[in-house]
């Protein structure tokens, strides 16, 4: 099956009121783990590639492997998505490489740190939509900046999504999907004490934008057992905390459709490899420990597909091609 535009996967999730994991991929083992989990669970899946992953894999290698994964699993709808695209040039480059979906992260300047003005975000995002849609490619935008919020601490660096601004943003840009800043952040240290998320923002945005697919970044749960395994076998990841699964399920109930996960895969891979190395000090065949890492990611991805309600939905629809999708976009 050709790779599917992300819009179709999210549209089906909207109909079925479930969430779809968007898992970061960097190498072959990670890709196999995620796609084999999806095949076993009969779940649609979004494979996302960051700028760092493009660089690490010398891009064409990773893209070729993702295409092979789609060919080998014709029964599973798979989207190839750019995670946190930073410029129109990059978006054009990956669309030429065959990506079926792109995120343009116009919330920050190209340095990845300085917040960008609303007007500048709209301008950049609209340019991306104008390039992507005639090619059938889905676009995700972002409004607000990611960052943990604590119960009793004012979040000065974090700009949460303003629902009314979100309404204007979607009307002015034409994005298909919108990443909301509701208090999550990337990485293993999302909260210092209790996890706090602004679920009311999801509710408000969903009311104003029922046709837009809502996205939650920074959605790793940082499960205790993964962190414990890393630490038990020589790692140092103290005080890590993520988003509990019941909170993600609540967010899905309120309208979140795409759930971005990277950190949990990193923890699973690292913990399993650390363990393998300690338990098998005489082994130096890299296939052995990479296979242990691959197996660990697979079983965690399977759990998430069950937790998010994605499992079992791969066969509900006939996946669209980029050609089919061109006729569906209005702008
Ligand atoms: O957006 C953050 C993802 O976890 C990707 O991370 O830029 O280190 O590949 P990365
Ligand atoms: P985590 O760091 O929580 O896995 O988030 C990943 C992400 O949002 C990628 O865009
Ligand atoms: Zn992200």
Image: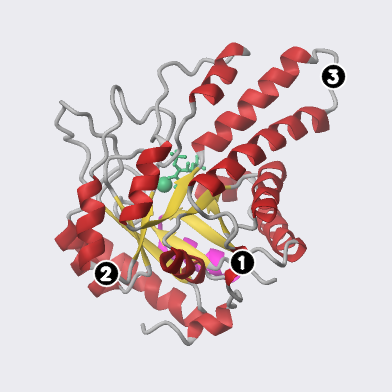
Residue identified by numbered label 1: 97
Q: Is residue 87 left or right of residue 181?
A: right
Question: What is the magenta range?
Answer: 86-98
Residue 213: percent from the left, percent from the top? 37, 64
Please tell me whether mark 1 sits on a helix, a strand or a loop: helix
Residue 146 to residue 286: above or below: below
Q: Is mark 1 within 8 Å of ligand 1?
A: no
Viewer-side residue, 102 vs 251: 251
- State the mark number for residue 62: none
Residue identified by numbered label 2: 170
Q: Is residue 16 left or right of residue 33?
A: left
- Image quarter (top left, top right, bottom left or bottom right) of the C terminus: bottom left
Please report whichever mark, 2 or 3, sits nearer to the chain's N-terminal start: 2
Please tell me whether mark 2 sits on a helix, a strand or a loop: helix
- Image quarter (top left, top right, bottom left or bottom right) of the N terminus: bottom right
Residue 24: percent from the left, percent from the top? 55, 47
Mark 2 nearby-residue class (10 Å; few <14, some 14–19, many ≥20): many
Q: Quadrant of residue 106?
A: bottom left
Residue identified by numbered label 3: 283
């Amino acid at each position: 099956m050709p790779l599917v535009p992300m819009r179709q996967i999210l549209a089906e999730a909207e109909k079925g009121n479930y969430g779809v994991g968007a898992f970061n991929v960097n190498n072959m083992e990670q890709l196999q783990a995620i796609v084999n989990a999806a095949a076993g669970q009969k779940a649609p899946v979004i494979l996302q590639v960051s700028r760092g992953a493009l660089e690490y894999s010398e891009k064409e290698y990773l893209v070729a492997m993702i295409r092979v994964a789609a060919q080998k699993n014709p029964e599973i709808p798979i989207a190839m998505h750019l995670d946190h695209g930073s410029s129109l040039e990059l978006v054009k480059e990956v669309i030429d490489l065959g990506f079926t979906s792109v995120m343009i992260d116009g919330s920050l300047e190209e340095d990845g740190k300085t917040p960008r003005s609303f007007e500048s975000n709209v301008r950049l995002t609209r340019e991306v939509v104008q390039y992507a849609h005639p090619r059938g490619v889905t676009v995700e935008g972002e409004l607000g900046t990611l960052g943990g919020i604590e119960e009793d601490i004012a979040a000065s660096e974090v700009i949460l999504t303003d629902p009314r601004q979100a309404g204007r943003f979607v009307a002015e840009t034409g994005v298909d999907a919108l990443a909301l800043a509701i208090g999550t952040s990337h990485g293993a240290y999302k909260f210092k004490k209790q996890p706090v998320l602004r679920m009311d923002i999801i509710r408000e945005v969903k009311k104003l934008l029922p046709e837009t697919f809502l996205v939650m970044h920074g959605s790793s749960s940082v499960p205790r057992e993964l962190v414990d395994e890393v630490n038990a076998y020589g790692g140092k990841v103290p005080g890590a905390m993520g988003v509990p699964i019941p909170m993600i399920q609540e967010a899905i109930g309120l309208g979140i459709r795409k759930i971005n996960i990277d950190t949990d895969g990193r923890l699973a891979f690292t913990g399993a490899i650390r363990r393998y190395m300690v338990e098998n000090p005489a082994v130096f065949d890299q296939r052995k420990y990479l296979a242990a890492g691959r197996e660990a990611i697979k079983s965690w991805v399977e759990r998430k597909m069950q937790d998010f309600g994605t499992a079992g939905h791969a066969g509900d629809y006939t996946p669209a091609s980029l050609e089919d999708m061109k006729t569906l976009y209005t702008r």
